[in-house]
Image: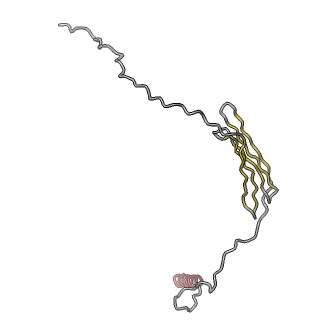
Amino acid sequence: MNTKVVLLFCFLAAASARPDVPSHHDGYGYHAPAHPVSYHAPEKHEKGMPFNFDYAVKDHYKGLDFGHNSNSDGNLVTGEYRVLLPDGRTQIVTYTADHYKGYQAEVRYEGEAKYPEPKPYAPAPSYGHPAPAYGPPAPAYGAPEY
């Protein structure tokens, strides 16, 4: 009796999970549309959380100078970040970002690039073989006794 009930439930589960297949000659239920359809992303936009932050690092000893500040009202994010480049200039990026226009940045530089003076080529000094820094071994024991 239990076997019949289990088989009945298996049959009902298989029948309810089976998709309805239309009577097309290929046996598949999907056919390409007659005209091309382009995908458009949904226009739903959820407002973000407002924020405001900034940080800066300025270490003359190590030659570090950079920072970032940004704020948002939930829809539009505006900000700026800056970094001291190895050539001595400061790169400053001012940006805005929102759901409709995306990320838009303006990059500018302050200062003038300075490069070290090139040094003339000097061949590496040649070195000879090192002299030994040790002498002959000294006996660690005395003569044998008979």
Residue for point 65% across, 80% down: 37
- In this rendering, is residue 29 above or below 54? below
Q: Is residue 141 left or right of residue 57?
A: left
Q: Residue furthest front?
A: 120
- Residue 53 locus on image (x, y percent): 78, 47
Residue for point 61% across, 36% down: 115
Asked where in the image residue 24 lies, by quadrant, the reply is bottom right
- Residue 142 locus on image (x, y percent): 25, 8
- Residue 127 locus on image (x, y percent): 39, 23
Asked where in the image residue 102 lies, by quadrant, the reply is bottom right
Q: Is residue 39 left or right of residue 52?
A: left
Number of numbered labels in the structure image: 0
In the image shown, does 57 or 30 lie closer to the viewer? 57
Residue for point 76% across, 66% down: 45
- In this rendering, is residue 93 above or below 29? above
Image color mode: secondary structure
Asked where in the image residue 145 lies, by quadrant, the reply is top left
Residue for point 56% across, 33% down: 118
Residue 39 visible in the picture? yes
Could you tell me which quadrant the C terminus lies in? top left
- Residue 36 locus on image (x, y percent): 63, 81
Residue 140 visible in the picture? no
Q: Residue furthest left?
A: 146
Q: Is residue 142 left or right of residue 86?
A: left
Q: Residue furthest right?
A: 73
